[in-house]
Amino acid sequence: MGHIQYYMNYADQPTAYREGANPGFHEAIGDLIALSVSSPEHLEKVGLLERTSNEELRQKVNLNYQLKMALEKIVFLPFAYVLDRWRWDVFAAEGGLDHALNRHWWTLRLRHQGLSPPVKRSERDFDPGAKYHIPAGVEYVRYFASHVLQFQFFEHMCGFVEPKGTGSGKPSSWGDSLYKCDFDGNKLAGASLRAMLAKGSSASWQSILKDFIGSERMSLGALRRYFTPLESFLDGFISRHNLTVGWADAKGKLCVLLLEGRGVFNEHFFFSGRLHEQCLLHLLLHFAHLWLRRRPRLPALASRTRPHPLCLCLPPQG
């Protein structure tokens, strides 16, 4: 539906300009609307979530919603980066990775996602090909960009909406309640969005972005502000449970997270043991925490320098 709305709004542009400002814009529109209509505030308004005056219960609902959204949005970022980083490395290597395509895939997944294969893998396997966009030759950085842009768009749209309970009658800063914003039915927000969509690609994406949100820069600042309550909760959770953030990324071995047995990574295969179930929650929580704690700045996607690893290591139990 987001794509269709974009098509309809730039339909009057010359044929050459009937496309998104950049591919990330096109992918961001549907998710932008979903950020508003999937919030507990909106679900209560349309009768899909029971209203409650119990403040403790409401806080739990909001925290669960933030965690759910973090698992959808933040955990996706390193995966989207890895997919095209692998492809760029293969192209740049000029044949140097011909005999290490699968190995390099899992090296990147370990480095940026903390994931290792659950069974033996070799160069006879081609795990990157399991993702449609690899064999189809569809660039994936558009989805990385969309997950940044949609929060910038959302924060701008919420600037037309008065935070619930302020009684000021005027829009103001949402502070740490940005995730509660629901711009459904707000004509000013809708008009601003339509004006941006109607431009298609008739100007540079930086110019269109600046006209829309007031800045020509893509930034993770809005995403981090959206997840401020979750970040505060995770800071306390990590402190109370004395958890160590970080995972090993040493050449010649795989990350082992609460594993039964050691992992092996050599010229022929790589293998890791079974992940303990109790590690899973910690892993998910830390993915959200680690990406939120990064500086609100996009990584240098085309850089050949090694990005900072985002990792989790927990000591074995028992």
Image (tube, grey):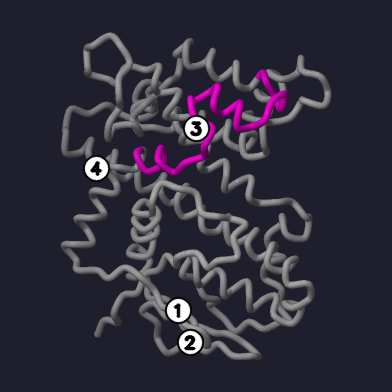
Q: Which kind of residue does numbered mark 4 sit on?
A: Lys
The residue wearing badge 1 is: 255
Please tell me which of labels 4 and 2 falls first in the chain.
Answer: 4
Magenta segment: 198-225
CB of mark 4 within 8 Å of CB of mark 3?
A: no
Q: In the image, what residue occupies the spot 67% across and 76% down?
A: 102
The residue wearing badge 2 is: 263
Q: Which kind of residue does numbered mark 1 sit on?
A: Cys
**Picture disc at residue 135:** none
Alpha carbon of mark 1 to alpha carbon of mark 2: how far?
A: 7 Å
Alpha carbon of mark 3 to alpha carbon of mark 1: how far?
A: 35 Å
Q: In the image, what residue occupies the spot 37% across and 43% down?
A: 224
Q: Secondary structure at mark 4?
A: helix
Q: Is residue 88 above or below residue 314?
A: above
Residue 151 in picture, x, y percent from top left: 46, 36
The residue wearing badge 3 is: 34
CB of mark 1 within 8 Å of CB of mark 2?
A: yes
Q: Which kind of residue does numbered mark 3 sit on?
A: Ala
Q: Which kind of residue does numbered mark 2 sit on?
A: Gly
Residue 256 in picture, x, y percent from top left: 42, 80
Please tell me which of labels 1 and 2 falls first in the chain.
Answer: 1
